[in-house]
Image: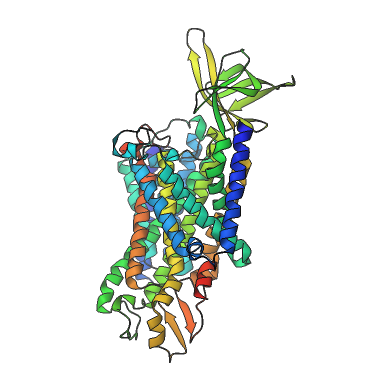
Amino acid sequence: MSWDSFVWFALAASLFWISGAIVSVISKRRLPAAVLTGCGSAIFMTFIVGVWISLGRPPLRTMGETRLWFSLFLSLIGLVVYLRWRYRWVLPFGCLMAVMFASINIFKPEIHTEELMPALRSPWFVPHVIVYMFAYAVMGIATILALRILWLTRRSAAGSALAPGSTTPATVDAAASPLSPSLQGDLRLCDTLVRMGWGFITMGIVMGALWAKQAWGDYWTWDPKETWAAATWLSYLLYMHLRQGSALSSVTSAGSVTIARQNSPAIEVASHSNKALRRTLFLLIFSFLLLQMCWWGVNYLPSAQGFSLHTY
Amino acid sequence: MVVAGHTFGLLAALLYVCLLVVIYVLRDRWPLFRHLAGRKACLTSISIVLFLLLVFGLVPQDGGRDGFFGVLGFRNMSRSPIFILALLLLATSVTLNTIGDIHRFSKHRLGVTCAHLGLSVILIAGLFGSGGTVRTVMIAMPNVPDHQARNEVTYEYVKLPFELTLRDFSVYEYSSEVTLTLPDGRSSEIKIAVNHPAKVGSWWIYQSDYLSDTERGEFASIFKCVCSPLSEVFSIALWLLLVSAAAMVFFAGFKPSFGKKGPLSVKLQDGAAPLGCETFNEKEERL
């Protein structure tokens, strides 16, 4: 199987993905949408396996090749989130992004068929790149969730995104109002995805370090790509620590909430004031921009030209 | 020289860890120590290192000393005093949290404890262990025994505790057939290739590059010989971090408590203390 047949596989997969996305929106049953999306992913996976066999090496070397995996993982993660957490809108988003990246590969393939250079002939190569691609896709979905929450909390000043029946006490400003259950669910899923994605990024970094030691004798050399990878990793780590500590800090800072509702048997305290929450979510979007810099931006960065082993 | 640098680094690292244990023990008596072990110090150290990384990522790392960034040492990040101080602050924060995790060990926080421990070992070994590492480059001519290599940093010649004789080099496989001779006279035939280094004691020999003599049709091999006594420590810490990350992925995706009752909301009974994901020092601050 060669890259000449990619357009047909991409079209067939895209057709299934778009159908799955539409069905997930219009139908209450999850199975038809899951089957359609799964078929699209299976077709795309078939092409990847075929190219892997025909090239005699894993298609993970060029930008075009890594985008293949990104498209596949986006559709799969959208499917898993849809089935596991029942988020209907994540599937269309994931599928549309997968179609978009598959389309980029049709119009701007950046495909090279040359053999792998010796340094890339390592058992670490495939897991290192695949876990990174998986992390990119997971963080992509988390970013979409963050954008959705930001968009909806923007309207919360008018009260539409507040929890039903929540009467904001006079001692609490509007920004500290609890989120609606739906947005709380989005936020929980966002945190779960970031935790998962950060785990994948960590695995990618560690595998890269172990590989670098085996190939070049140094675990870490602060190559520009490594610098941006470390920045991305720390940025997501900062997000997780801010979110982790948010419950306590909001409780202590919102002591007035406790006083205002002393008669209630139990109080559901919002984990963040909306303002602080929005700042944290902006950090998540910033982290995703850093991820893009780490993935492909570094190839165009003047400071990396001539200094990076990773520019390709 | 290697042994001296290594011993000094090891002693410094041990002293540093002892100092952190003292800080942890005395954190209730000294507000500064309490803050150092607190969440704010953790967030601050991550933010400072992140900011510096963004600057280093945008400035070419050519080692130059001219210009605004050159004068401030921003063109050579691995030798930048500001960056080393920032990493030291991060190491302090992570290690204090690790000591707290170990002191108040809970199996529910095993993944976080392992991640903290792995990260603090990596940071401490990186900050204090680099003094004992020697990186040299050897150009091995065909069939000429050699035991000297040039230090990558000082450019001085270093006498290696072994002798290498290049027998053959394959351009396609990027590998060398070499005779390795030890000081006691024992010798063996070994193959050194990219991703497949040879190990002699605490020295690692890597296939780095090659030179070709097109007229004679011969090749000289360039080896990188690295002595890194703390290599195994790094390796163990990295594997620890890898396992913690894998556990994090698994539990983030499948553990019900993450999906249903995540860290978002905290239920408070009247007058009851908040429960959840607070760190040991936050808990103490609250109490």
Position above or below: A149 against A309: below
Q: In the drawing, does residue A102 fall left or right of residue B222?
A: left
Q: Which of A95 and A290 is in front in this view?
A: A290
User: Please, which colouring scheme is shown?
Assistant: rainbow
Q: Where's residue A266, x and y in %?
A: 47, 86
Point out the residue furthest to the left here: A158
Residue placed at 44% from the left, 90% from the top?
A: A264
Q: Is residue B17 in view? A: yes
The quarter of the picture where the C terminus of chain A appears is top left
Q: Where's residue A74, x and y in %?
A: 41, 55
Q: In the drawing, does residue A267 fall left or right of residue A110?
A: right
Q: Nearer the viewer, residue A236 or A84?
A: A236
Residue placed at 55% from the left, 37% from the top?
A: B131
Q: Nearer the viewer, residue B123 or A267?
A: B123
The quarter of the picture where the N terminus of chain A appears is top left
Residue placed at 37% from the left, 57% from the top?
A: A95
Point out the residue furthest to the front here: B29
Q: Where's residue A98, x and y in %?
A: 37, 53
Q: Quadrant of residue B60?
A: top left
Point out the residue furthest to the top here: B215
Q: In which quarter of the image is residue A181?
A: bottom left
Q: Where's residue A281, x and y in %?
A: 35, 63
Position above or below: A12 against A309: below
Q: Is residue A37 in view? A: no
